[in-house]
Amino acid sequence: MTISVLSVASEAWPLVKTGGLADVVGALPAALAPHDIHLTTLLPAYPAVKAKVGRTRRIHVYDDLLGVKARLLAAKVDDHPFFLLDAPALFDREGGPYGDVGGRDWVDNSLRFAALSRAAADLASAVVGKGFDLLHAHDWQAGLAPAYLRYASPQRRGRPVPSLITIHNMAFQGQFAASLFPSLGLPKTAWSVEGVEYYGDVGYLKAGMASATAISTVSPTYAREIRHGEFGMGLEGLVRARAADVHGILNGIDPAIWNPSTDPLIPSRYSPRTLGKREPNRRAVESAFGLDHDEHPLFIVISRLTWQKGMDVLVDCLDALVGMGAKLALLGSGDPALETAFVTASQRHPGRIGVRIGYDEPLSHLLQAGGDAILVPSRFEPCGLTQLYGLAYGCVPVVARTGGLADSVIDANEAALANGVATGIMVDGVSHDALLHALTRTVKLHRDAPLWQSIQKQGMRADFSWTASGARYASVYRDMVKD
Ligand code: ADP
């Protein structure tokens, strides 16, 4: 039986991306198509999205969507169907999806994403259009959609349209003052601990987790970690209460975009059998970042520069990293203090540390294709994609043992090396000493070229395509529709 799914999110590759969420939402339709599951993706019509989609078809006009005028538009991108919520008062502005050019959150984010969620529930429950078998909401920005389905939408066969909420990062919860509640268009019954109320506020992610038929997160280890306070961040009790409905499904990577043997964004394409062809890419990275051309290990970072990503700990290890003879090329942006710290370190170590502050998709491909090892020392990491790209590109991941990092990398300990299964290096506990220890181990392994190449090849052969994870989502969807 064909299943139709409306997937709703605040970003999706190739239309708008600030992080891993976009990669995953963008990849799901192709991952699910072989399972006879048809996804349509609903996004806000940010100006950048409108500029990219080309022709659109108007399918609905709202005179009053939570107080604003809006239109729903239909479009096709790479043969994949999209709906866009075109609400100029909410989305037509300069800046990013969540904040202004200076990085400050939009003050009306609560309303912007409530409107997106309301439109999603309308589409799923056939208030607008023909309806869908299931709604798949991603993160807090779509968190109210399951609540609208539960409390304020027509039912189907005597029950709300089933919904799945995927948590891509528990750290972002969408918590707003209780005074917002009356403007959300939800009935009074929704204001309870079982509904949208969250420590006296309105919680969007909480509302989604309490209202959805099922919950998923993006790795099995993170699904276990969020049962506890340190990772659950206030929602651990709800995760435990709904344990039977919580699934941990590791993200895949899209081989049409992330494949070193076909990647149009890198100067020299290669496969596990032609690792020597990585050399021109390595040279290109060194040139782009003003680094010395030498044989010493080239570490890379492609990351939001934040506490979550352990970037403060890395800053403290930079002098030692250079002391070991290694080099670093870093691409990222985020916390201004961390940006400054990395730039200062690059000035202190010319030729050894190169820093590019900003967001640059093509450069991120080049770094994976030319770097020796990618550093991901996150304090928590729901899935993490850059280590998966690193594995595919022979850029050996050096990762913290947490969340999806723990689920995707096999540490090069003695047993794993002896058995030829090692794919990376684990950092145990994110501290200065632990990271330093991992860096030292990495530099030592890199000196043994045949051993290093065997680790690279093992990672490149590991299968992190969407085949397995697509099948898991398909089975979760089917169970929800069947129930
Ligand atoms: P998160 O979503 O928490 O930021 P992930 O590892 O899941 O982390 O996904 C990050 C995604 O964003 C990857 O596709 C990565 O390549 C990309 N990315 C992060 N920072 C940059 C940057 N400065 N330039 C280009 N791509 C970046």
Image (tube, helix red, strand yellow):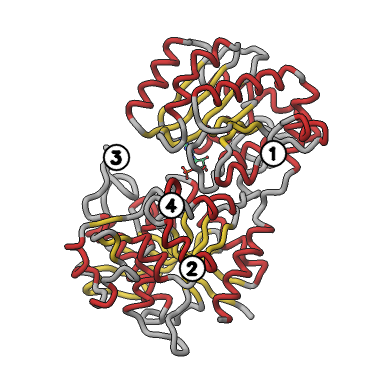
In terms of sequence position, does the residue under pointer 4 or pointer 2 come before the other?
Answer: 2
- Pick the residue in front: 356 or 341: 341
Amino acid type at circle 2 is Leu
In terms of sequence position, does the residue under pointer 1 or pointer 4 come before the other?
Answer: 4
- Disc 1 crowd, CA 10 A, few/some/many (<14, 14-19, 20+): many
Amino acid type at circle 3 is Gly
Q: Position of residue 129 (x, y in %)?
A: 41, 80
Element on which disc 2 rests: strand
Between marks 3 and 1 in the image, the one whose residue lies nearer the viewer: 1
Q: Is mark 3 within 8 Å of ligand 1?
A: no
Q: Position of residue 124 (x, y in %)?
A: 43, 76
Amino acid type at circle 4 is Gly
The residue drawn where x is 36% and y is 76% is 122
In terms of sequence position, does the residue under pointer 3 or pointer 1 come before the other?
Answer: 3
Between marks 4 and 3 in the image, the one whose residue lies nearer the viewer: 4
Q: Position of residue 148 (x, y in %)?
A: 34, 73
Which residue position is annotated with label 3? Answer: 103
Amino acid type at circle 1 is Ile
Element on which disc 3 rests: loop
Which residue position is annotated with label 2? Answer: 164
Which mark is on residue 410?
A: 1
Between marks 2 and 3 in the image, the one whose residue lies nearer the viewer: 2
Cα separation, mark 4 vs mark 3, equals: 26 Å
Query: For residue 483, which quarter of the picture?
Result: bottom right
Q: Is mark 2 within 8 Å of ligand 1?
A: no
Cα separation, mark 1 vs mark 2, equals: 30 Å
Determine whether 152 is above or below 271 in the image.
below
Which residue position is annotated with label 4? Answer: 232
Between marks 4 and 2 in the image, the one whose residue lies nearer the viewer: 4
Cα separation, mark 4 vs mark 2, equals: 18 Å
Cα separation, mark 2 vs mark 3, equals: 30 Å
